[in-house]
């Protein structure tokens, strides 16, 4: 029998992503990616338990990736930007906050459901005066039509928050990253985000939003973020 917090993969998707079960309703499991910002549902009969060795393998790959991120060169005598990281995944938020701390970057984290961001975002900006805002958590695309935003689980929530910020703050005032796995990249960028996920409706890593925040924070205000360097870090 499956239970909450079991690590599983889906047979029908050739075990492409490791998930954690966050809830079970009748015979349907609600899943969150273990290292991907993806949320999904699955019939229990399509799931298999993932062995501990696979989890260890993912953790080791993550440690290697973090080492690479920490080696990103930064300008000397440069005042870094202040980060407000809003995340609907508490575990991912804590991992990202730890990374910011290890890089000595000023960052404030808020654990919040995607649907609540638009309710609180302006108050948070007023309180914290951030230079960089990360709006992330989980998302998914049901493959029923790329342009229809109702086909994305949380993209509209990110869009509402971005548009609200842009009513009060320009792109030069606050840098925004928005989105998660399979989000509608084009719609997020059109709403006013400086960076967004996911251009090809692909899954993104737990640390990807933090990587964008780090690169924005350590880039002097009079320089343009090197997109090639960002892509290298995300791969």
Image: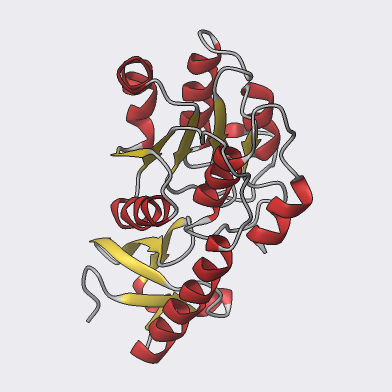
* Residue 110 figure quarter: top left
Q: Nearer the viewer, residue 114 or 93?
A: 93
Instruction: Give the answer, above or below, for where 166 lies relative to 197.
Output: above
Indicate the position of residue 51 as horizontal and vertical percent values: 36, 89
Q: Nearer the viewer, residue 33 or 10?
A: 33
Assign the N terminus to one quadrant of the image. Answer: bottom left
Q: Residue at x 30, y 66 (%)?
A: 21
Scheme by which the image is coloured: secondary structure
Assign the C terminus to one quadrant of the image. Answer: bottom right
Instruction: Give the answer, above or below, for where 211 lies relative to 194.
Output: below
Q: Residue at x 54, y 17 (%)?
A: 163
- With 108 as the anchor, is 82 left or right in this view? right
- With 120 as the anchor, is 157 left or right in this view? right
* Residue 54 figure quarter: bottom left
Indicate the position of residue 139 as horizontal and vertical percent values: 49, 47
Q: Residue at x 25, y 77 (%)?
A: 2
């Amino acid at each position: 029998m499956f239970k909450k917090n079991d690590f599983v993969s889906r047979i029908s998707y050739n075990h492409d992503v490791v998930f954690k079960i966050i809830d079970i309703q009748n015979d349907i499991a609600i899943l969150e990616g273990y290292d991907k910002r993806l949320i999904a549902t699955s019939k229990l009969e399509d799931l298999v338990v993932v062995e501990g060795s696979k989890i260890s393998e993912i953790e080791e790959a993550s440690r290697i990736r973090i080492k690479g991120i920490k080696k990103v060169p930064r300008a000397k005598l440069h005042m870094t930007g202040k980060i407000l990281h809003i995340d609907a995944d508490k575990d991912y938020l804590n991992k990202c906050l730890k990374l910011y701390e290890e890089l000595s970057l000023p960052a404030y984290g808020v654990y919040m459901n995607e649907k609540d961001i638009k309710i609180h975002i302006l108050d948070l900006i007023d309180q914290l005066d951030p230079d960089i805002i990360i709006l992330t958590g989980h998302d998914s695309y049901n493959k029923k039509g790329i342009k229809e935003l109702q086909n994305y689980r949380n993209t509209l929530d990110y869009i509402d928050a971005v548009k609200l910020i842009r009513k009060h703050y320009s792109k030069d005032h606050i840098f925004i990253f928005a989105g998660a796995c399979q989000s509608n990249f084009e719609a997020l960028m059109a709403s006013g985000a400086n960076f967004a996920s996911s251009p090809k409706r692909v899954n993104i890593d737990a640390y990807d939003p933090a990587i964008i925040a780090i690169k924005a924070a350590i880039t002097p205000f009079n320089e343009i973020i090197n997109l090639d360097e960002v892509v290298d870090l995300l791969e």
